[in-house]
Image (cartoon, rainbow, N blue to C red):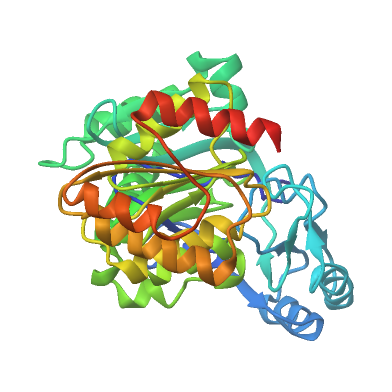
């Protein structure tokens, strides 16, 4: 019997303005179930008593209680348990709810468990891996499958890449019959399982496109002891840029599961992703932002974030972005790299000065600006009284900011 809980991390794609929204397992299963994917019966609970009631509602001799957080590795971390009574469900839920669960994807601080999912237990014969995602290499959606289900798929890809099967999808025809049959046979499925697998891929494909998803992951997809396919765990990630079409999906967002800085950035429509370095970066344009991070790494340091303020930012938006940068205690120096096209350099300078005065600039600031109204922007910075280091080009800016961060 497999308890579930192994998931790959959500993609943090920082090319362009593409950001992602995660949902909980129980929400993903509800969506996939509407499209015809086979999912176990289950009920979400926010209190121990609700967990006990959920066990009784299912009416099964055994159930699995799963912590609901936006992170994989829940089973290994003790966040998933097989229970045989309502009292056991209540007791295990009480041990999880309101407490942090630490997995390999949460960091040492963990994530606070606010809900559990009580699900009918399944008798498992085999565990498989199945996902649908945007494959940038083939410039198409793709099916990823492996017979090594229930395991860390990144580790499998690294150590045994031959076990990972990839099948690009032609969006003009969808999932073709020959594709699903080829994958099914490669996964060791036979007879009616091949038809079930084809129907499952069709359900995932419809859900993928209808919801503007960037990832659907089933890990594990199991073959039960009766020989049927079942989505024992499910993960869905949605493209933020498509959420305006899906108010029903926006309601599924759980702000408590999001990084506070990223949540604040979303209020101002800023493309912000927190990273692990100590040099804060504020750039306009995704390509320039990627190049800025690359040149920081080239000089031996690590960026603390990806932050693209966009081409049409005003002073208020720039100020908000700068405050978010400075709120990160790991940041030892800040690099602002702006090429003024649509984004005017004087507007940027006004926003930076306003934010620095409000929050107090206590780390070195290196600015490289070129483009529209660059001289006016430099005058604003020079007249501000702030300790700002002007850089002549990207190379000079990177060298300076790395040296300043290293000396802190």
Residue nearer the viewer, 83 or 366: 366
Q: Single out the residue that lies furthest toward the left.
A: 172
Q: Is residue 57 above or below residue 177?
A: below
Hey, which quadrant is residue 181 in on the image?
Answer: top left
* Residue 254 in view: no
Q: Position of residue 215 (x, y in %)?
A: 40, 47
Residue visible at 86% across and 68% down in the picture: 92
Position of the C terminus, as image quadrant, is: top right
* Residue 215 in view: yes
- The number of discs equals 0
Q: Is residue 9 above or below residue 136?
A: below
Q: Position of residue 140 (x, y in %)?
A: 23, 35
Q: Position of residue 32 (x, y in %)?
A: 41, 61
Q: Position of residue 387 (x, y in %)?
A: 53, 50
- Viewed as shown, does residue 337 lie left or right of 109? left
Residue nearer the viewer, 71 or 222: 71
Q: Is residue 84 above or below residue 206?
A: below
- Viewed as shown, does residue 66 lie left or right of 294? right
- Viewed as shown, does residue 390 lie left or right of 90? left
Residue nearer the viewer, 319 or 382: 382
- Viewed as shown, does residue 234 lie left or right of 249? right
Residue visible at 65% across and 61% down in the picture: 69
């Amino acid at each position: 019997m497999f308890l579930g809980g192994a998931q790959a991390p959500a993609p943090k794609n920082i090319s362009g303005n593409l950001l992602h929204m995660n949902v909980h397992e129980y929400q993903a299963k509800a969506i996939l179930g509407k499209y015809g994917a086979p999912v176990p019966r289950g009920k979400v609970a926010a209190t121990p008593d609700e967990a006990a009631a959920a066990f009784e509602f299912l009416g099964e001799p055994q159930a699995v209680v799963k912590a609901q957080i936006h992170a994989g590795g829940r089973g290994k971390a003790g966040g998933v348990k097989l229970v045989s009574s309502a009292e056991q469900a209540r007791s295990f839920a009480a041990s999880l709810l309101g407490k942090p669960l630490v997995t390999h994807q949460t960091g040492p601080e963990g994530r606070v468990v606010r809900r559990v999912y009580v699900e009918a237990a399944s008798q498992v014969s085999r565990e498989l891996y199945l996902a649908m995602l945007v494959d940038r290499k083939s410039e198409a959606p793709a099916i990823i499958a492996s017979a090594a289900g229930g395991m860390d798929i990144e580790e499998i890809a690294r150590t045994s890449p031959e076990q990972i099967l990839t099948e690009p999808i032609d969006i003009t025809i969808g999932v073709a019959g020959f594709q699903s049959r080829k994958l099914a046979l490669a996964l060791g499925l036979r007879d009616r399982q091949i038809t079930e697998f084809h129907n499952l891929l069709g359900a995932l494909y419809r859900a993928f496109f209808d919801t503007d998803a960037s990832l659907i992951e089933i890990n594990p997809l199991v073959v039960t002891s009766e020989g049927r396919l079942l989505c024992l765990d499910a993960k869905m990630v949605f493209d933020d840029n498509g959420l305006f079409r899906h108010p029903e999906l926006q309601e599924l967002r759980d702000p408590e599961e999001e990084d506070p800085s990223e949540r604040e950035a979303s209020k101002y429509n800023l493309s912000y992703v927190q990273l692990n370095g100590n040099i804060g970066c504020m750039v306009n344009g995704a390509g320039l932002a990627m190049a800025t991070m690359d040149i920081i790494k080239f000089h031996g340091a690590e960026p603390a974030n990806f932050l693209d303020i966009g081409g049409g930012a005003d002073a208020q938006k720039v100020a908000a972005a700068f405050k978010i940068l400075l709120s990160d205690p790991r940041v030892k120096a800040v690099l602002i790299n702006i090429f003024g096209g649509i984004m005017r350099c004087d507007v940027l300078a006004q926003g930076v000065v306003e934010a620095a005065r409000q929050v107090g600039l206590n780390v070195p600031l290196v600015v490289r600006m070129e483009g529209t109204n660059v001289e006016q922007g430099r005058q604003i910075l020079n007249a501000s009284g702030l300790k700002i280091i002007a850089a002549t080009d990207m190379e000079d800016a990177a060298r300076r900011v790395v040296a300043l961060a290293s000396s802190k």
